Amino acid sequence: MISDLRRVPRALVRCAGALLALVAALILLGTPAAHSAAAPKIVSVDITGNLHVPTATIMQAIQARPGETYDPQIVQGDLQHLNALGYFADVAPPLVRARPNGVAITYRVVENPVISKISFTGNAHVPTDTLLALMDLSVGQVFNTNTFRNDVLKINNYYERIGYGGQVPTHVKDINLDPKTGALALTIQEGLTVRRIIIGGDPLLPPPYIAKQLALKPGMEYSDEMRDKDAQALRKFYEDKLKVELGNFEGGIDPSSIDLKNGTADVKYNVYVARIAAVQIVGNTRTKDQVIRRELRVVPGMVVNTAWIKADYERLNATQYFSKVEPDIKEGPDPKKPQDVTLVWHVTEQRTAQAQVGFGYSGGITGQGLYGTLGYSDNNLHGTGNSATVQFQRGARTYSTQIGTVIPYVGSTRKSQRYSLGVNLFSSGSTYYYPVYSVSQTIVAPAPVVGGTPLPVPVTLYPSSNSSLIGGIVSTSSSSATGGNVTIGRRLSDYLTLSVTPTLQRVKYSTTVPSPYYFQGSQPNVLTGPTPNPLTSNVNSVNGSFGISAGSIANVNTGLPYQLNTLTFGLGTSPITVDDPYNPRHGWKATLSELISSSHVLRSSFNFTQTTIDVARFVPVLKTATFGLHGVADLSTGVIPPSSLFTFSDQQTRGYNNVFYGTDAFFGQAEFRQPLTADRKLTLAFFVDELRYRIRDASPLVDPYTNRIVGYPGDWTVRGDAGFGLRFDVPQLGLHTVRIDFARGADGTHTSFGIGQSF
């Protein structure tokens, strides 16, 4: 193109040289003595050869004027001015002719052709209409080299703006102007052809794998637009597939590889994944930095993985030390390395210490009576992450004392902090009063007297169609337990923990009736002494507290102390398997425990095992709702003391006012939770509960007087309910969920109240 543009002015240069020679000759011939006379005057100036360019336009570029003194240098300058107009293919030497009063000057020009057509080739990405709109030259105009030069600059600038800059000297590679037809043809070179793509930087993935994600391929023309598309595609690929942020992307033509002859070059992409250069913690005034950092798994040097950061977020949330946790990515310490960033954890601490003072009343002969509660707990003692609990409860019929502490991370080394330690000491007792029934339909109250001595009257705790309630007489059932346990935990991973808990406790049971009444058969009898040892319990043993004749329940209602020593092995998920420890929306949690009580190994008074599998799953549904499923399997072997039976109260079976006891049970729940407020502090729940339980080895209890069955066999019993409830968050009291449920079971409706979600 450059050579073609120079063809026109080259002819003008030749003409200018001839013109100078002619002017010099005329001057010498027209003046006999060069210095003898004054220079002639210009009498006229005219133009010839212009067909389309107005004469007035040309005359504006000429400085020689009639009436002025003829000056060859001015004429020479006029030739340059005519060439500079850009309209002419040639400027012939001017005619300088003598006249009576001076000289006449005639400038002779050869116009460029009138443009009849403008065409482009090689413009694959930019439409011809766009290129024509960039040009001032148009069909019907005289071709002007100045205007065309500016048009070329505008075309180059446009290609640079759309991402083709820095590749070739000019994108108008060649021009062809037909002097006869006026057809103007332009050859466009938009960019260089990619010979190969080189992947550098810190891409984390092999270059061939990255190349598959690129839209730019060898053999295609390079543009910054294609580069930017590749950058966006890689950023999305890293975030969607790897959950990794792209920290920096640099790309372009490698200048050292440009081959203008073949129109090719290499493209180099430097891909840098974002890496953590520093981790900062902001907002903690009480909780020590190391307590927070030991929960974090994303450390300096690691890539910015959103899934890993989310896991750290959930891990910090699960500590329950903070009301708000917010991760933030900021610029790193080195501005020259934008791919190195700083991860900032903004935490807002919440109150972790709670003092509890309360009282309550539960009436009736089976109620707790008036009771009061005093307690203190802190799950972040002095900001160390350790917890401590002290709880006292005292009532007319119950008492309970508990002191415990948990150290979630033992020691300060990486190895020792895989372990946790918990210690708990407790003492509890209760005294309840139960009605008694006669063994026949004849009510015996008061007891008959013969010869001044009341006769013994057999009674039972089991209501049946063959027995009658004895008014004014109740049985007294007392139990107590004192002991402690130690739990040693071992983290197998961030999601799984193994634990072992030895528990030593001394238990005592006693169920009595006032004389002259007594429990018939093998039931507890204050007159004849203790019932058989629990280790020799058989199908004929009867437990007075539960009204069950079963070899699986130890007959311990004697008032004698027993030793209940157990060893529990547990395997469970950590709190981070759910997104929120209080109100989870997604995730799952599971525990598996095996409790062993052995007279030979653990010196316990009882031989039994209990296995529990507990699994819960949470799934987000609709926009803000949650659907949860919960299943529990409880299985046992051996002879179990009453205090260790699996129990299900209205906290599980919400449609019943009863407490269900079993040696084996299967329990399932399904619950739909729909928040009613944007902050999720008020939630409506719909639920279904299903319990299937049994007393293993239970047999019918036969009345010795009538031979009627007044107990029940040990078959599986099913209890189900359905209902709805409300959930309230009361942060002022340190309560995340207060639960009120309304449910209907087989026996009618029931309202239950609880703290925390049902599962």
Image (cartoon, rainbow, N blue to C red):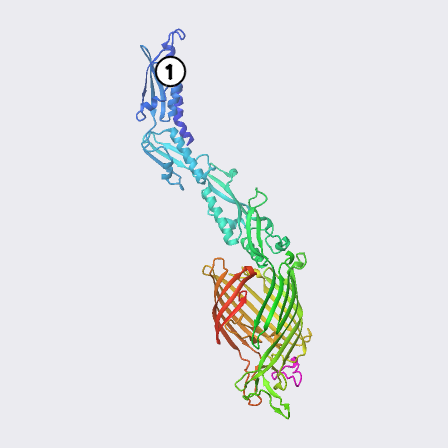
Left or right: 527, with 37 as reference point: right
Residue 600: x percent and y percent? 69, 75
Residue 354: x percent and y percent? 60, 61
Circle 1 residues within 10 Å: few <14, some 14–19, many ≥20? some
Question: Given the image, on which type of amino acid does mark 1 rest?
Answer: Leu
Residue 50: x percent and y percent? 31, 24
Q: Residue furthest left?
A: 51
**Which residue corresponds to mark 1?**
22
Q: Main secondary structure of the magenta part?
A: loop
Q: Nearer the viewer, residue 451 or 758?
A: 451
Q: Which residues are magenta?
A: 524-540
Tell me the quarter of the picture where residue 95 sits. Answer: top left
Instruction: Tell me the element at label 1.
Output: helix
Relative height, residue 154 to residue 286 (above, below): above
Please identify the quadrant where the N terminus is shown: top left
Q: Is residue 583 visible?
A: no
Magenta stretch: includes residue 538? yes
Q: Nearer the viewer, residue 557 or 102?
A: 557
Relative height, residue 520 to residue 608 (above, below): below
Magenta stretch: includes residue 191? no
Q: Is residue 722 visible?
A: yes
Please identify the quadrant where the C terminus is shown: bottom right
